[in-house]
Amino acid sequence: MSTERRPVSGRWFEQLAVGDVIQHVTRRTVTETDNVLFTTMTMNPQPIHLDADYAAGTEFGRPLFNSMFTAALVVGLSVPELTLGTLIAQLGMSDVQFPAPVFAGDTIRAETEIIEARASKSRPNAGLIVFEHRAFNQHDELVCRLRRTGLMHRDPDRADETS
């Protein structure tokens, strides 16, 4: 990694401690267009997402938001405060849960807890972080929880401390 300073708003590996909980500033009201575009772009023909008449006959009574959009949104809401410019790679996701449905018009907010942090064994200028992202609707109902592992840059200004 170049030690040349570049603009970042994310945090370096050293700035993320196990137990930290970050409340993300950006919130997002989701729309029917979001749901239809995401669902059709991912080639998902599920009528519960796309067919209002079909969805009206389900237990939800209206189209249900595509859960993969919800997962992508919760990760995206976390990027400015966590990983913008400081993530090397996303290594995986696990424990993905959707305990409550999301509908068009819901406003989603997110928070992230740092679950695990360890230095990389193969990259001296990097560390691995396990994030638990949680998303809530406007009624403070948990609508998504997932864990994501990221390979993060270490702070180049502290490179001498890691060598």
Image (spheres, rainbow, N blue to C red):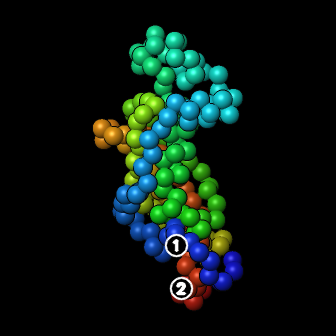
Residue 90 place in picture, x, y as percent: 61, 56
Query: From the viewer's perspective, is 74 left or right of 88?
Result: left
> Which tag, 2 or 1, sits closer to the chain's start?
1
User: Dot 2: what SS?
Assistant: helix
The relative height of residue 155 versus residue 91 in the rendered view (above or below) is below
Q: Is residue 129 visible?
A: no
Res. 137 image quadrant = top left
The relative height of residue 139 versus residue 62 in the rendered view (above or below) is below
Q: Is residue 46 visible?
A: yes
Residue at the (40%, 57%) spot, across then down: 25
Residue at the (54%, 85%) spot, across then down: 158
Residue 129 image label: none
Residue at the (59%, 65%) spot, across then down: 87
Residue 158 image label: 2
Residue 143 place in picture, x, y as percent: 40, 37
Residue 12 image label: 1
Assign the N terminus to one quadrant of the image.
bottom right
In the current view of this chain or complex, which residue is farthest to the bottom? 160
Q: CA distance from mark 2 to mark 1?
A: 10 Å
